[in-house]
Image: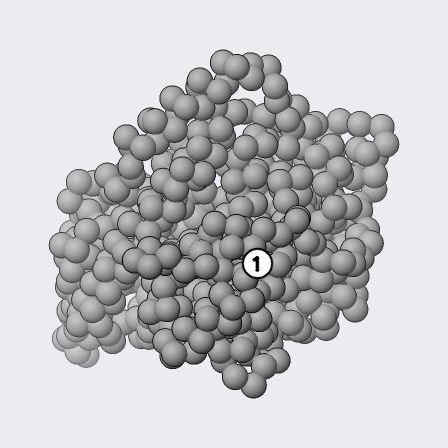
Amino acid sequence: MDFMLPLESYIERYRYKYAALYHALKDAIWEGRLEEGTRLPSSRWMAKHYGLSRGSVAEAYEMLQADGYVHTEIGSGTYVAFAATSVSSPTEEAPILLSPWARRVMSTKLPPRQQDEGRLCPSFTSSNRLPEAEASQYSFGGAIHTPGTADAPSPSDISFVPRRMPEDHFPDAEWRRSLSAAAAASAVNRGVTDAKGSLELREAIAAHLRLTRGIRTLAERIILFNGSMHGIALLTQLLIQEQDEVVLEQLCYPGIRRAVAVCDGRIVAAELDREGIIPDDWKARLLFVTPARQFPTGAVLSLQRRRELLSWASRTGAVIVEDDYDSEFRWGGRPIEPLKALDTEERVIYVGSFSKTMPEDFRVGFAVVPPSLVEPLLSAKQLYDPIPSGQLEQRAMAYFMTRGSYARHLRRLTRLYEIRYSVFTTWMKYYTDSLFDLEPTDAGLHVFGRWRQDPASYEVFRRAAAVRGVWMRDMKDYSLSPSVPAVSFGFSHLDEQQLEEGARRMQLAWQDVLDLQKQGEQQDLDRR
């Protein structure tokens, strides 16, 4: 069950937890986020995921049934029985200042900035390859080795560089049926296109977000892109004026940093701790943040900090871009309320994609934007993408979602990733506990690890690990300022045997480093 309620806010307002749950569910039904016929989670599931007793859940359900909001079918479950007339939206919308380029696009449909052509979606080179290993061969401990690379490992290598979904766990048969249904529909609606993207998919995404993220939105507020970075790059052009300050998390995705630089924005690095971004009184108009699971540390932003960010945006007139990059996979802990679900002034732009849940060639991202930004963003998108690509795949995805196939696919992957996370952390603690301080997580596809040994030995260890056929993603390209050496370990694409073998090889690599150090010390003694 993928289900999200903004329960934290209600627990603060109501003395008893059963009352908080009752009002949270009642409001979600009344506002249309839980549609008529939606099956509510079992009392056992609700109690486990929200830290409640089953008695409190049962009492809340009974109150909802007495008021006519739900009905119970014996042996089947509890279902929403009330149909909201429409999905409500936040009542206020604060003005958003657009860049001069955005205003020109709206008024005259000028071509894109000349200096930005070809750089709309910035790319980056990650330091997956060791600095000393640019050539195909390099030495370690006096011997010459020819390993693979993190991007192209040899068959015997084990790469912990985060990857997309394992292809053998994708429901190909269900997806082919969705493509066939979409092709049949396309034959009827041939030539009908919308620059926002497929209406069917936008409606499916809106329903999915209402149920799983608690976000009140409609299809007309959603715009589809060729991946989330496409949307982020366009948003930076719309919202950043030359020399505007833009707040980025101290560790963040390099593509966002380059998108800001292309628009001549001045980057302000926001400090992080184990609870994510630390709010400050920034003099900026734009903030990029990953509150559900900070990228790449995995830290979860507390409700108090989320409110502080919204308060800052309200005071300063700033816009917050919330990047929700892999929160679909949560196997423990209370579901996290997105900033967008708390936004009452339409200052948050919610960005998501299907990159972690669909095959690699499926490139669809989306943004939920304030009403005042819909037309500017659509005008900018039409300059670069006047006829949206992938219409067949978008309609197939809508079919895949509305038939329930996507939800089943997510549940299967979540169970798989929970097992692999447990296996990975178990073997890492057994073999490499002295090397990395792993950040605990209950969601996502990677684990952040801080180097525990002498910083000078970090690169030596990475070289030794590469010789042993183990690769990991170094975090220095993700950092806006010098920081402690750290690594991002992707585990979801590796099976249990590979996870253990990778951890064991890292232990052997560290022993290689220690042996090499001892040899150097002995040679020093011999020279003396």
On screen, residue 124 versus residue 360, left or right, reads right
| Colour pattern | one colour
Q: Residue at x 82, y 54 (%)?
A: 95
On screen, residue 428 versus residue 291, left or right, reads left
User: Where is the N terminus found, in terms of image quarters?
Assistant: bottom left
Provide the secondary structure element on which disc 1 rests.
Answer: helix
Instruction: Please give the residue where the numbered disc 1 appears in the rendered image.
Output: 29
Q: Is residue 486 visible?
A: no
Q: Residue at x 66, y 24 (%)?
A: 386
Q: Amino acid at mark 1?
A: Ile
Q: Is residue 224 visible?
A: yes
The residue closer to the viewer here, 267 or 65, is: 65
**Residue, far right:** 107
The residue closer to the viewer here, 286 or 325, is: 325
Q: Position of residue 334 (x, y in %)?
A: 43, 70
On screen, residue 277 versus residue 497, left or right, reads right
The quadrant in which residue 114 appears is top right
Query: Mark 1 packing: few (<14 Cα in 10 Å), some, or many (20+)?
Result: many
On screen, residue 88 versus residue 402, left or right, reads right
Q: Residue at x 45, y 24 (%)?
A: 182
The residue closer to the viewer here, 241 or 275, is: 275
Q: Position of residue 83 (x, y in %)?
A: 58, 51
